[in-house]
Image (cartoon, coloured by chain):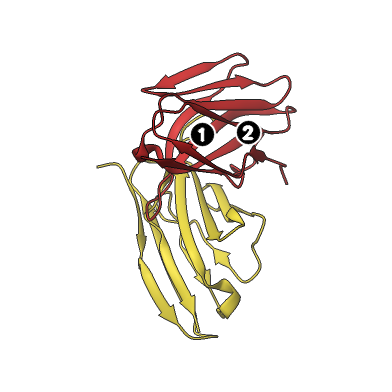
Amino acid sequence: ILNVEQSPQSLHVQEGDSTNFTCSFPSSNFYALHWYRWETAKSPEALFVMTLNGDEKKKGRISATLNTKEGYSYLYIKGSQPEDSATYLCAPASGNTPLVFGKGTRLSVIA
Amino acid sequence: EAQVTQNPRYLITVTGKKLTVTCSQNMNHEYMSWYRQDPGLGLRQIYYSMNVEVTDKGDVPEGYKVSRKEKRNFPLILESPSPNQTSLYFCASRLGLRNEQFFGPGTRLTVL
Protein backbone atom coordinates (compact mmCIF):
# COMPACT_ATOMS: atom_id res chain seq x y z
CA ILE A 1 0.00 0.00 0.00
CA LEU A 2 1.49 3.35 -1.05
CA ASN A 3 1.90 5.86 1.77
CA VAL A 4 0.59 9.23 0.56
CA GLU A 5 0.63 12.12 2.99
CA GLN A 6 -1.09 15.44 2.44
CA SER A 7 -0.71 18.48 4.65
CA PRO A 8 -2.29 20.37 6.12
CA GLN A 9 -5.50 18.39 6.66
CA SER A 10 -7.56 21.56 6.53
CA LEU A 11 -7.03 25.21 5.91
CA HIS A 12 -9.14 28.33 6.36
CA VAL A 13 -8.06 31.43 4.45
CA GLN A 14 -9.50 34.83 3.68
CA GLU A 15 -10.58 35.72 0.18
CA GLY A 16 -7.59 37.10 -1.69
CA ASP A 17 -4.99 35.15 0.31
CA SER A 18 -2.59 32.88 -1.50
CA THR A 19 -2.09 29.42 -0.13
CA ASN A 20 -0.25 26.17 -0.76
CA PHE A 21 -0.40 22.54 0.30
CA THR A 22 1.91 19.57 0.15
CA CYS A 23 1.68 16.01 -1.11
CA SER A 24 4.40 13.53 -0.09
CA PHE A 25 4.77 10.15 -1.75
CA PRO A 26 7.31 7.35 -2.19
CA SER A 27 9.79 8.33 -4.89
CA SER A 28 10.61 4.80 -6.04
CA ASN A 29 9.02 3.43 -9.25
CA PHE A 30 7.36 6.75 -9.97
CA TYR A 31 5.17 7.18 -13.05
CA ALA A 32 2.99 10.23 -12.45
CA LEU A 33 1.45 12.41 -9.77
CA HIS A 34 -2.22 13.38 -10.05
CA TRP A 35 -4.01 16.32 -8.41
CA TYR A 36 -7.80 16.40 -8.10
CA ARG A 37 -10.28 18.96 -6.89
CA TRP A 38 -13.32 17.68 -5.02
CA GLU A 39 -16.22 19.99 -4.28
CA THR A 40 -18.88 19.02 -1.78
CA ALA A 41 -21.70 16.93 -3.30
CA LYS A 42 -19.77 16.47 -6.54
CA SER A 43 -17.22 14.00 -7.89
CA PRO A 44 -13.45 14.58 -7.91
CA GLU A 45 -12.18 16.29 -11.07
CA ALA A 46 -8.64 16.20 -12.38
CA LEU A 47 -6.52 19.35 -12.10
CA PHE A 48 -3.11 18.12 -13.21
CA VAL A 49 -1.21 14.99 -14.11
CA MET A 50 2.53 15.55 -13.71
CA THR A 51 5.21 13.15 -14.87
CA LEU A 52 8.65 14.79 -14.96
CA ASN A 53 10.88 15.93 -12.13
CA GLY A 54 10.76 19.72 -12.02
CA ASP A 55 7.41 19.82 -13.84
CA GLU A 56 5.31 22.92 -13.26
CA LYS A 57 1.71 23.10 -14.38
CA LYS A 58 -0.77 25.96 -14.24
CA LYS A 59 -4.51 26.33 -14.66
CA GLY A 60 -5.75 29.83 -14.00
CA ARG A 61 -4.82 30.78 -10.43
CA ILE A 62 -3.84 27.22 -9.50
CA SER A 63 -0.38 25.82 -10.14
CA ALA A 64 1.61 22.79 -9.07
CA THR A 65 5.23 21.72 -8.91
CA LEU A 66 6.76 18.27 -8.73
CA ASN A 67 9.94 16.86 -7.17
CA THR A 68 10.16 13.16 -7.95
CA LYS A 69 13.61 12.67 -6.42
CA GLU A 70 12.49 13.64 -2.94
CA GLY A 71 8.87 12.59 -3.42
CA TYR A 72 6.76 15.71 -3.01
CA SER A 73 4.49 18.04 -4.91
CA TYR A 74 3.15 21.47 -4.00
CA LEU A 75 -0.19 22.91 -5.07
CA TYR A 76 -0.50 26.71 -5.01
CA ILE A 77 -3.61 28.85 -5.22
CA LYS A 78 -3.05 32.54 -5.86
CA GLY A 79 -5.65 35.02 -4.64
CA SER A 80 -8.08 32.43 -3.23
CA GLN A 81 -11.76 32.88 -4.02
CA PRO A 82 -14.79 31.33 -2.25
CA GLU A 83 -15.31 29.07 -5.29
CA ASP A 84 -11.89 27.51 -4.60
CA SER A 85 -13.33 25.95 -1.45
CA ALA A 86 -12.97 22.21 -1.93
CA THR A 87 -10.90 19.22 -0.91
CA TYR A 88 -7.71 18.85 -2.92
CA LEU A 89 -6.49 15.28 -3.41
CA CYS A 90 -3.21 13.98 -4.71
CA ALA A 91 -2.49 10.46 -5.98
CA PRO A 92 0.81 9.00 -7.19
CA ALA A 93 0.78 6.45 -9.98
CA SER A 94 3.44 3.82 -9.46
CA GLY A 95 4.13 0.72 -11.54
CA ASN A 96 0.98 -1.13 -12.47
CA THR A 97 -0.85 -0.33 -9.26
CA PRO A 98 -4.03 1.70 -9.08
CA LEU A 99 -4.13 5.34 -8.04
CA VAL A 100 -3.92 5.61 -4.25
CA PHE A 101 -5.30 8.87 -2.95
CA GLY A 102 -4.13 10.87 0.01
CA LYS A 103 -6.78 11.98 2.50
CA GLY A 104 -6.76 15.44 1.00
CA THR A 105 -6.47 19.03 2.14
CA ARG A 106 -9.80 20.67 2.84
CA LEU A 107 -9.71 24.35 1.87
CA SER A 108 -12.29 26.87 3.06
CA VAL A 109 -12.10 30.37 1.63
CA ILE A 110 -13.96 32.94 3.68
CA ALA A 111 -15.39 35.95 1.82
CA GLU B 1 -20.26 13.23 -24.09
CA ALA B 2 -17.36 11.40 -22.43
CA GLN B 3 -18.52 10.15 -19.08
CA VAL B 4 -18.65 7.52 -16.37
CA THR B 5 -22.16 6.56 -15.31
CA GLN B 6 -23.24 4.75 -12.16
CA ASN B 7 -26.59 3.31 -11.16
CA PRO B 8 -28.37 3.61 -8.89
CA ARG B 9 -27.37 6.99 -7.48
CA TYR B 10 -29.08 6.31 -4.16
CA LEU B 11 -30.01 3.01 -2.57
CA ILE B 12 -31.40 2.00 0.79
CA THR B 13 -31.41 -1.73 1.42
CA VAL B 14 -31.42 -4.27 4.22
CA THR B 15 -28.72 -6.53 5.56
CA GLY B 16 -28.15 -9.62 3.45
CA LYS B 17 -30.04 -8.58 0.32
CA LYS B 18 -27.70 -8.95 -2.66
CA LEU B 19 -27.21 -5.85 -4.76
CA THR B 20 -25.25 -4.67 -7.78
CA VAL B 21 -24.08 -1.15 -8.55
CA THR B 22 -23.40 -0.73 -12.24
CA CYS B 23 -20.61 1.36 -13.73
CA SER B 24 -20.11 2.12 -17.39
CA GLN B 25 -17.66 4.35 -19.30
CA ASN B 26 -17.77 5.40 -22.95
CA MET B 27 -14.12 6.46 -23.36
CA ASN B 28 -12.58 3.07 -24.18
CA HIS B 29 -10.48 3.28 -21.00
CA GLU B 30 -8.30 0.36 -19.92
CA TYR B 31 -8.32 1.05 -16.19
CA MET B 32 -11.42 1.06 -14.00
CA SER B 33 -11.69 1.28 -10.22
CA TRP B 34 -14.17 1.30 -7.38
CA TYR B 35 -13.68 3.49 -4.31
CA ARG B 36 -15.61 4.09 -1.15
CA GLN B 37 -15.57 7.38 0.70
CA ASP B 38 -16.12 7.54 4.44
CA PRO B 39 -15.74 10.58 6.70
CA GLY B 40 -12.17 10.98 7.92
CA LEU B 41 -10.90 8.07 5.82
CA GLY B 42 -10.73 9.64 2.36
CA LEU B 43 -11.15 7.64 -0.83
CA ARG B 44 -10.26 4.01 -0.34
CA GLN B 45 -9.88 1.60 -3.21
CA ILE B 46 -12.06 -1.49 -3.21
CA TYR B 47 -11.15 -3.21 -6.49
CA TYR B 48 -9.55 -2.22 -9.75
CA SER B 49 -9.22 -3.62 -13.24
CA MET B 50 -6.46 -3.06 -15.78
CA ASN B 51 -8.35 -4.66 -18.66
CA VAL B 52 -11.07 -7.14 -19.57
CA GLU B 53 -10.99 -10.21 -17.31
CA VAL B 54 -8.17 -8.67 -15.22
CA THR B 55 -9.21 -7.54 -11.74
CA ASP B 56 -7.36 -7.11 -8.47
CA LYS B 57 -8.09 -6.25 -4.87
CA GLY B 58 -7.58 -2.78 -3.52
CA ASP B 59 -7.22 -1.79 0.11
CA VAL B 60 -10.72 -2.73 1.32
CA PRO B 61 -12.07 -5.62 -0.83
CA GLU B 62 -13.82 -7.63 1.89
CA GLY B 63 -17.53 -8.09 1.22
CA TYR B 64 -17.31 -6.98 -2.41
CA LYS B 65 -16.98 -8.66 -5.79
CA VAL B 66 -16.41 -7.24 -9.26
CA SER B 67 -16.31 -8.48 -12.81
CA ARG B 68 -14.92 -7.06 -16.07
CA LYS B 69 -16.47 -9.01 -18.90
CA GLU B 70 -16.53 -6.03 -21.27
CA LYS B 71 -14.22 -3.05 -21.43
CA ARG B 72 -16.92 -0.49 -20.75
CA ASN B 73 -18.60 -2.08 -17.71
CA PHE B 74 -17.31 -2.75 -14.21
CA PRO B 75 -20.15 -3.68 -11.82
CA LEU B 76 -19.69 -3.79 -8.05
CA ILE B 77 -21.50 -6.66 -6.33
CA LEU B 78 -22.36 -6.88 -2.66
CA GLU B 79 -23.44 -10.50 -2.11
CA SER B 80 -24.59 -9.98 1.47
CA PRO B 81 -24.50 -6.30 2.40
CA SER B 82 -23.91 -5.30 6.00
CA PRO B 83 -24.38 -1.95 7.77
CA ASN B 84 -20.61 -1.28 7.70
CA GLN B 85 -20.87 -1.06 3.92
CA THR B 86 -23.02 2.05 4.23
CA SER B 87 -20.93 4.54 2.31
CA LEU B 88 -20.56 6.74 -0.77
CA TYR B 89 -19.19 4.73 -3.69
CA PHE B 90 -17.37 6.06 -6.74
CA CYS B 91 -16.50 4.31 -9.94
CA ALA B 92 -13.64 5.75 -12.00
CA SER B 93 -11.81 5.08 -15.23
CA ARG B 94 -8.66 6.22 -17.02
CA LEU B 95 -6.74 5.40 -20.14
CA GLY B 96 -3.34 4.76 -18.55
CA LEU B 97 -1.01 5.56 -15.66
CA ARG B 98 -0.19 9.01 -16.99
CA ASN B 99 -3.77 9.94 -17.86
CA GLU B 100 -6.34 11.71 -15.72
CA GLN B 101 -8.98 9.67 -14.00
CA PHE B 102 -12.67 10.33 -14.60
CA PHE B 103 -15.12 9.72 -11.78
CA GLY B 104 -18.74 8.70 -11.89
CA PRO B 105 -21.35 10.75 -10.00
CA GLY B 106 -21.30 8.47 -6.95
CA THR B 107 -23.76 6.04 -5.37
CA ARG B 108 -24.91 6.65 -1.83
CA LEU B 109 -25.69 3.29 -0.25
CA THR B 110 -27.38 2.77 3.10
CA VAL B 111 -27.60 -0.74 4.54
CA LEU B 112 -30.06 -1.07 7.41
Front-most of B33 and B39? B39
> Residue tagged by mark 2?
A23
Residue B50 in the image: x percent, y percent? 55, 44
> Which type of secondary structure does the marked residue at label 2 adopt?
strand
Q: Amino acid at mark 1?
A: Trp
Please report whichever mark, 2 or 1, sits nearer to the chain's N-terminal start.
Answer: 2
Give the colour in which the image draws chain A: red
Query: How many marks overall?
Result: 2
Front-most of A31 and B56? A31
| Image quarter of the N terminus of chain B | top left
Q: Residue at x 72, y 19 (%)?
A: A69
Q: Is residue B112 left or right of residue B8?
A: right
Front-most of A102 and B48? A102
Residue B12 in the image: x percent, y percent? 41, 79
Q: Is residue A59 above or below residue A108?
A: above
Q: Residue at x 64, y 41 (%)?
A: A97
Q: Is residue A37 above or below residue B34?
A: above
Q: Residue at x 43, y 23 (%)?
A: A78
Task: In the picture, one chain is yellow; tell me its letter.
Answer: B
Residue A35 badge: 1
Q: Can residue B82 be seen in the rendering of this structure?
A: no
